[in-house]
C-alpha cells in the first residue's frame, strides 16, 4: 500500500487569483446585504408614514 504524501505548504497556499475570487465573492455578498437593508428601510418608512 502506498503512503500518502503530505502536501507542502507551498501547495496549500492560495494563489493571487484565488484570493481575488474570494474577495469578489465577499464584495458581492456585502453589496447584497446593503441592498436588503435599503429595501427593508424603505418598507419600514412607508409603513410608518401610513
Image (cartoon, helix red, strand yellow):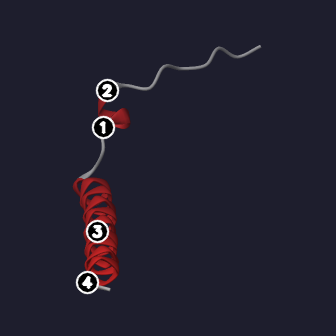
Query: If you read the primary sequence from the N terminus, does the residue marked by circle 3 or circle 4 appear first?
Result: 3
Q: Secondary structure at mark 4?
A: helix
Tag shown at residue 49: 4
Q: Residue at x 34, y 79 (%)?
A: 47
Label 1 environment density (alpha carbons within 10 Å; few <14, some 14–19, many ≥20):
few
Whole-angstrom CA distance, mark 1 to mark 2, is: 6 Å
Whole-angstrom CA distance, mark 2 to mark 3, is: 41 Å
Tag shown at residue 37: 3
Query: If you read the primary sequence from the N terminus, does the residue marked by circle 3 or circle 1 appear first?
Result: 1
Q: Residue at x 26, y 73 (%)?
A: 41
Dot in front, 3 or 1: 3
Whole-angstrom CA distance, mark 3 to mark 4, is: 18 Å
The quadrant in which residue 34 appears is bottom left
Position in image of residue 45 (x %, y %): 25, 78
| On screen, residue 20 above or below 42 | above
| On screen, residue 49 above or below 17 | below
Label 3 environment density (alpha carbons within 10 Å; few <14, some 14–19, many ≥20):
few
Q: Are marks 1 and 2 in contact (CB under 8 Å)?
A: yes
The quadrant in which residue 29 appears is bottom left
| On screen, residue 43 above or below 10 | below
> Which residue in the structure is indicated by mark 2?
9
The quarter in which the N terminus is drawn is top right
Q: Secondary structure at mark 2?
A: helix
Residue in the foreground of this view, choosing between 8 and 17: 17
Q: Residue at x 29, y 59 (%)?
A: 26
Label 4 environment density (alpha carbons within 10 Å; few <14, some 14–19, many ≥20):
few
Label 2 environment density (alpha carbons within 10 Å; few <14, some 14–19, many ≥20):
few
Q: Secondary structure at mark 3?
A: helix
Dot in front, 2 or 4: 4
Query: If you read the primary sequence from the N terminus, does the residue marked by circle 1 or circle 4 appear first?
Result: 1
Amino acid at each position: 500500500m502506498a503512503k500518502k504524501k503530505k502536501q507542502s505548504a507551498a501547495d496549500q497556499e492560495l494563489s493571487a487569483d484565488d484570493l481575488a475570487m474570494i474577495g469578489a465573492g465577499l464584495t458581492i455578498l456585502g453589496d447584497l446585504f446593503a441592498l436588503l437593508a435599503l429595501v427593508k428601510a424603505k418598507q419600514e418608512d412607508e409603513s410608518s408614514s401610513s
